[in-house]
Image (cartoon, rainbow, N blue to C red):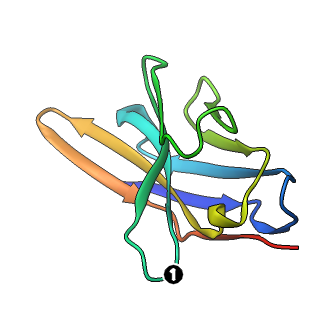
Amino acid sequence: QVQLVESGGGLVQPGGSLRLSCAASGTIDSINAMGWYRQAPGKQRELVATLTSGGRTNYADSVKGRFTISRDNAKTMVWLQMDSLKPEDTAVYYCNVVTVVFITVSHYWGQGTQVTVSS
């Protein structure tokens, strides 16, 4: 089991920046990948950025060049640096980790943190 707690959301003006944090605890040795997803009102949850244990990153086209995902070596923290924010980035952002234990793959989610981009 992995527990995730996000922080860092809030209200920011267009063009501004925010940094989201996610603290992981529990069986972190089994974490294979960490990432961020978001869900805007009336829309499906979508991938924002992921980072594998090998250091490979993947970004949604809509955030490439503006957002940066990173983590600590112990895989207890994952961050999402969001720059040049746009109103369309407004959503609830969720931290996600994927664990692999033998052949069992599991997904864990945080409770979500609201990001609102508005003037």
> Where is the N terminus found, in terms of image quarters?
bottom left
Residue in front for this viewpoint, 89 or 74 = 89
Residue 31 falls in image quadrant: top left
Residue 75 falls in image quadrant: top right
Q: Is residue 31 above or below residue 90?
A: above
Q: Farthest residue toward the bottom?
A: 42
> Where is the C terminus found, in terms of image quarters?
bottom right
Residue 35: x and y in percent read: 49, 44
Q: Residue at x 41, y 32 (%)?
A: 29
Q: Residue at x 84, y 50 (%)?
A: 17
Residue 91: x and y in percent read: 60, 70
Residue in front for this viewpoint, 113 or 39 = 39
Residue 27 falls in image quadrant: top left
Q: Farthest residue toward the left?
A: 103
Q: Residue at x 15, y 32 (%)?
A: 102
Image side of residue 40 versus residue 32, left or right:
right
- What's the residue type where badge 1 is placed? Pro
Label 1 belongs to which residue? 41
Q: Is residue 63 above or below residue 9?
A: above
Residue 67: x and y in percent read: 67, 40
Q: Is residue 44 above or below residue 27?
A: below
- Few, some or many residues within 10 Å of mark 1 (<14, 14–19, 20+): few
Image side of residue 57 versus residue 14, left or right:
left
Q: Is residue 62 above or below residue 89?
A: above
Q: Residue at x 67, y 42 (%)?
A: 79
Residue 34: x and y in percent read: 47, 40
Which secondary structure, mark 1?
Answer: loop
Image side of residue 113 versus residue 118, left or right:
left
- Count how many numbered circles sit on residues in the image: 1
Image side of residue 93 versus residue 100, left or right:
right
